[in-house]
Each structure stands twice: as C-alpha cells, then as structure tokens.
Amino acid sequence: METLKVDLGDRSYPIFIGAGLLKKQSLIAPYIKGKTTAVVSNTTVAPLYLESIHQNTCDYNNTDVILPDGEEFKTMDTLSQLHTEMLTARCDRKTTLIALGGGVVGDITGFAAASYQRGINFIQVPTTLLSMVDSSVGGKTGVNHPLGKNMIGAFHQPQCVIIDTDTLNTLDDRQLSAGIAEIIKYGYINDLTFIDWLDENMSKLMKRDPIALSYAIKRSCENKAGIVAADEKEAGQRALLNLGHTFGHAIETGLGYGKWLHGEAVAAGMIMAAQLSKEHGWISENDITGMRKLLKKANLPTSPPEEINAERFNELMSIDKKVQDGVLHLILMKKMGESFITNDFDKQALKKVLGHSN
C-alpha cells in the first residue's frame, strides 16, 4: 500500500493506494468520527462492493443510499433524494458519509456532506480510474445544471481517500480510457517526463497491468495533491488542473450529460487548447501530433463533435467557472509540459479553433 498526503494543515488527509484495501477494516475505522455511517453508491457499483464496506462498518449504525448510475443524474434532484434519505435515517452531525463509486457519486456525496446540517464528515472510496486520479482528491464537490457543468457546489475536503485498485477489474474499457485522459492531463500541465512514461507504457495501462496502473494513479495523485495544497480553493494555480476542461465541459453540456464521458470530452478539449496554443506560436503542429497519437493509444477522441459549432461553443463557454468579471480565462500551453492560465488570447484564433479548424 502507498500512502500520500494532501497537506492542508489541520484539514490534511491521507490517500491510500493499493490492492485489496476494501477488505481492511483497520483502514477506514479511524476516519469514522461518530457511531453512524451512510454509504452512498449507485446501482452499478453497490452490487459489486457494498458488502465489503458493510463488513468494514459492522460496528456502526449504517444506512445505504443507492443512486441511479450516470452523469445525467448528477443533479439537484438527486442531491435532494440523498438529503431526504439521510433525514429519514436520522443522520446527525456526527454521521460519516462514505462515497462508494465514481465521480458522480463522489461529487454528490461530498456536496451532501458539505451542505447537510452545514457540514459533516465524508470518506471517498473511488471505484473508477477517473475518480481515483481526479475527482476524489481535492475537495471539489457539486452537481450539474442544465446550463453548465459543476456550476453548483462547494469545497469540502474528505477525511481520507481509499483507492482499491482491485475495483478497476470490473471497470469497462470506455471508462478506463476516460480515466487515462485525466492521467495524461497531468503530464501536459507540468510533468513532461510523465508523458514520456505514458507513451512507453500505454499498452500496459490499456491491458490493466496492476503495476503500471498503480504507478500512474500514484503519480497523478502526487501531482494533484501538490497543486491542491498550494491553492485549495482555486484562487490561481489550481485552475491549471482544468486543462481542456472549459472546452470539455462545453461538449458535455452541449451534447447532454452522459453522451460523452467526462474524460472523453477532456481529451478533445486538450487538443483544442493545444490548437489555440499553436495559433499563438507557443507549441508546434508536431507537438499536437504527438498529443493526438498518445490520446489515440488510449482510444480517446481527438476532435470535438461536429454538432457543436463555434457559436454554440461560445455560448456554452460563457457559462463557466473560469469566467471572471465577464472575461473568459483559459488554460493554454506555453510549451509542452508547461501550462498556464490566461485571458490574453487572440479571439479570432479561438474562433478558428471553435470552428474545428486545424
């Protein structure tokens, strides 16, 4: 088992990474503060792993809340359903929520923990690769709105993150690829040697080699934990973690939540960010070609859907968390492996990229 730390002073917490961790009662017990737990999962994950959580929480009064599975259910209505079941079960301020599932479950559970009785504890137990390397770490919680993704939420840090890599054995291939998109993202933000490693080891990741997956998860979490520790609430540096996301969120919202997986949209969004960077002369066409090849090795899209035109992209991107005082900020690349946030970009070049032009 590997143990990392998200260093946030008195709100610091560990990330545990390893195989078979769901079977270790001694791992989760220290992070349950009261006598009551509520396990939040979904209809796909619960039949696979809920019993393991039950075995580790048998000493507590436990409630299960099983949500429908899918990005389209990451809504205020689902959050209200969760709150209702918590109230019905008489959950109180010492109840610990346990998020067992992918990013949707983790985000909704975290937001419920942040908002229920003005804040209770929760634990992240991610079961998808994407949630392991991204959404379970850092305390971003929330739900989608029909007009914009993740626009309603709160910063609320978990007590710990338990990453059992054995759960990846039941993950479908498309979800695996979506998670790899977020792993690739870290390399292009500030870790170019990681890109070299990914290029050499992508076939191992796609074949679910446990050693390669564990290394990729650990390195991704190390990258994210360092950025979160420096900028917990995204006042500056943390926005770098959104490389490709402004374009990607527009794709997800424009198509309808769930049509493209989050990682698929981010993959196309990273290419669009790279294209805009190339238009400014910061990176080359060869750089973009290399990025495309790496994403294709992971069976990820490398261009946006044709049904979203430039006008619609502009409309969707105007409702984004990186719009400040009416001005859109984007994460672009000064060179490969060195991303930065800026509002000083050529609007005509952006229009060209949004029109799907190379």
Image (spheres, helix red, strand yellow):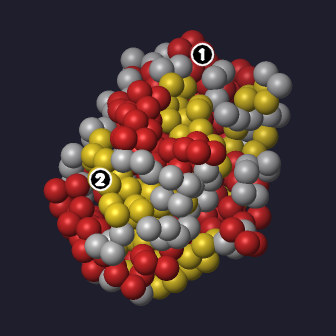
Foreground mark, 2 or 1? Answer: 2
Image location of residue 66, percent across then percent down: 27, 46
Residue placed most toward the observer, 225 or 278: 225
Residue 255 coordinates in the image, percent (x, y): 39, 23
Say above or below: 184 vs 215: above
Q: Residue furthest front?
A: 90
Relative to 352, say whether 80 is above or below: below
User: Pointer 2 and pointer 1: residues touching (CB < 8 Å)?
Assistant: no
- Residue 349: x %, y % from top left: 68, 26
Q: Which mark is residue 64?
A: 2
**Closest to the observer: 98 or 70?**
98
Disc 2 to disc 1, how far (Cα)?
A: 40 Å
What is the number of callouts on the image?
2
Amino acid at circle 1:
Glu
The reply to whether residue 185 is in sight is no
Looking at the rendered structure, the secondary structure element under dot 2 is strand
Outermost top residue: 311
- 105 left or right, relative to 231: left
Q: Quadrant of residue 313?
A: top right
Q: Is residue 334 left or right of residue 155?
A: right
- In this image, 338 relative to 166: left or right? right
* Residue 52 seen from this side: yes
Seen at 27% across and 38% down, the residue is 68
Residue extending farthest to the left is 47
Q: Residue at x 53, y 19 (%)?
A: 147
Against 250, residue 64 (above or below) is: below
User: Which circle's residue, 2 or 1, is located before the other in the chain?
Assistant: 2
The numbered mark at residue 315 is 1
Give amino acid for label 2: Asp
Residue 198 screen position, x and y as percent: 44, 69
Q: Which quadrant, please, contains the N terminus?
A: bottom left
Residue shown at the point (59%, 33%) measured from the top left: 152
